[in-house]
């Protein structure tokens, strides 16, 4: 599967660097050509001589020596490869990648590449679990970097937990999966996708509103995953505290009615995913001025129902997206309620999640979802919202391919 493939391996400075020597051999066994960049810290763990003896090539180490006329430039070095693999990916290398640093050859080549990148993190468990590393990991995932490991286990430093670099066969399997079909990485190329995300805000008066706890994390992750899959994505989002995803056309709205108008404007699309927590009701008569505390006591508010954006789009006679996906945020009878919603709203798939207090779904980074279709229910293991997004987008791309 790897015959003729060119892999540029970046070896960072960690005790796991010794496994990278084995990785080079096993990649070569499968017919790949490996070139290696060894970071300065990497030379503390493996020598350029051992790396070069295995690759049968020059070991690239210095940024500025590559500017010599006789040498290959750093841009060319990364462009020449089919895939870049960083193993071990230290906390420092991940931080550099996440922040776009380019102060040595490894970080410069990683910034200059237009190829897919796989990282195999390896570090002390505290370093791995540190919020800074987890933030960098999320950024890298958002940038489309693939990650293998780390595994749980005892580490050279004597601690136990996540931080051990993935084993060589696992890294090879990840590389093979990425190489298996280059088209798989962009299965939604040329397709339009509309995603709603976040809460809506329904005004009471010019200073007050009714809203909900939706963070927008799941919807934004879906928009990002669809963009990574090559789609042209419009994300219609209510007010959230998280940044706009990169490479996505973002429309900011407040109310449910604004959201519907923005979605209609973004159509036609092949796929529409409604992840927003839309307020079901709005205040019937929004006060023109701030409601004052008066002698009359608290105001009583009358409500009217908001348009159902999902049901409206799913029910379109002309220009209905090929796949219309709803979410069901439930606190009780999750699956039964989701089944009922699927039928009532006329969509093709409902992603049901339990948002009861204590599940940590609202605002959290992980989600346990059930995919409900007319054919049945599939429950996915608890995973990060980014993983749910990628898996969902892959599933939708697959279904679209079959329509
Ligand atoms: N939805 C929508 N427009 C609305 C209400 C909901 O597009 N006005 C979408 C949501 O984005 C979600 C799905 O409908 O994809 C289900 O939302 P949910 O709040 O769970 O369902 P409701 O219809 O509001 O039902 P209920 O509140 O009774 O559970």
Image (tube, rainbow, N blue to C red):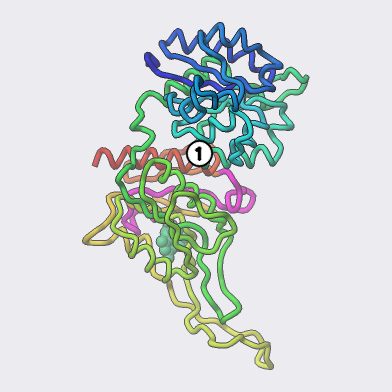
Give the number of marks: 1
Of residues 173 and 201, the one nearer the viewer is: 173
User: What residue is drawn where x is 62% and y is 30%?
Assistant: 104
The residue sitting at the front extreme is 69
Of residues 149 and 309, the one nearer the viewer is: 149
Q: Is residue 345 magenta?
A: yes
Of residues 220 and 359, the one nearer the viewer is: 220
Whole-percent x and y of residue 43? 67, 17
The quadrant in which residue 320 appears is: bottom left
Q: Which residue is mark 1?
A: 387
Q: Is mark 1 within 8 Å of ligand 1?
A: no
Quadrant assignment for ligand 1: bottom left
Tell me if mark 1 has few (under 14), some (14-19) or many (20+) residues whose alpha carbon lies within 10 angstroms of its own: some
Q: Is residue 298 magenta?
A: no
Whole-percent x and y of residue 214? 55, 58
The quadrant in which residue 375 appears is: top left
On screen, residue 243 versus residue 321, left or right, reads right
Q: Which residues are magenta?
A: 340-366
State the quadrant of the N terminus.
Answer: top left
The quadrant in which residue 37 appears is: top right
Whole-percent x and y of residue 229? 39, 40
Name above or below for residue 357 compared with residue 281: above
Whole-percent x and y of residue 9? 53, 21
On screen, residue 47 versus residue 230, left or right, reads right
User: What residue is drawn where x is 67% and y is 91%?
Assistant: 294
State the quadrant of the C terminus.
Answer: top left
The residue sitting at the right extreme is 158
């Amino acid at each position: 599967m790897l015959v003729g493939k060119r892999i540029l391996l970046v070896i960072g400075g960690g005790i796991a660097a010794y496994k990278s020597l084995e990785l080079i051999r096993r990649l070569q066994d499968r017919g790949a050509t490996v070139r290696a960049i060894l970071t300065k810290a990497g030379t503390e763990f493996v020598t350029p001589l051992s790396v070069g003896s295995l690759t049968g090539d020059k070991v690239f180490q210095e940024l500025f020596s590559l500017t010599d006329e006789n040498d290959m430039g750093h841009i060319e070095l990364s462009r020449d490869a089919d895939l870049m693999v960083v193993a071990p990916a230290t906390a420092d290398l991940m931080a550099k990648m996440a922040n776009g640093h380019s102060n040595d050859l490894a970080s410069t080549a990683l910034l200059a590449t237009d190829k897919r990148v796989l990282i195999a993190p390896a570090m002390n468990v505290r370093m791995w679990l540190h919020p800074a590393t987890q933030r960098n990991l999320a950024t890298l995932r958002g940038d489309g970097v693939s990650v293998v490991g780390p595994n749980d286990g005892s580490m050279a430093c004597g601690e136990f937990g996540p931080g051990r670099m993935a084993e060589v066969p696992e890294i090879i399997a990840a590389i093979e999966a990425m190489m298996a079909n280059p088209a798989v990485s962009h299965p939604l190329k040329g397709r339009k996708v509309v995603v709603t995300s976040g809460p809506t805000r329904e005004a009471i008066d010019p200073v007050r509103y009714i809203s909900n706890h939706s963070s927008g994390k799941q919807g934004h992750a879906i928009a990002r995953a669809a963009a990574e899959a090559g789609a042209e994505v419009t994300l219609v989002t209510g007010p959230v505290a998280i940044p706009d995803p990169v490479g996505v056309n973002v429309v900011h709205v407040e109310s449910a009615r604004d959201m519907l108008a923005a979605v209609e404007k973004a159509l036609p699309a092949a796929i529409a995913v409604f992840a927003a927590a839309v307020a079901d009701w709005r205040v019937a008569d929004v006060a023109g001025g701030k409601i004052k505390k008066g002698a009359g006591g608290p105001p009583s508010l009358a409500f009217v129902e908001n348009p159902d954006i999902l049901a409206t789009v799913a029910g379109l006679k002309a220009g209905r997206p090929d796949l219309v996906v709803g979410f069901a945020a439930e606190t009780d009878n999750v699956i039964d309620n989701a089944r009922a919603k699927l039928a009532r709203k006329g969509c093709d798939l409902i992603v049901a999640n339990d948002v009861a207090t204590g599940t940590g779904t609202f605002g959290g980074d992980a989600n346990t979802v059930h995919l409900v279709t007319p054919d049945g229910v599939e429950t996915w293991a608890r995973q990060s919202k980014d993983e749910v997004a990628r898996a969902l987008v892959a599933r939708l791309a697959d279904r679209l391919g079959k329509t």
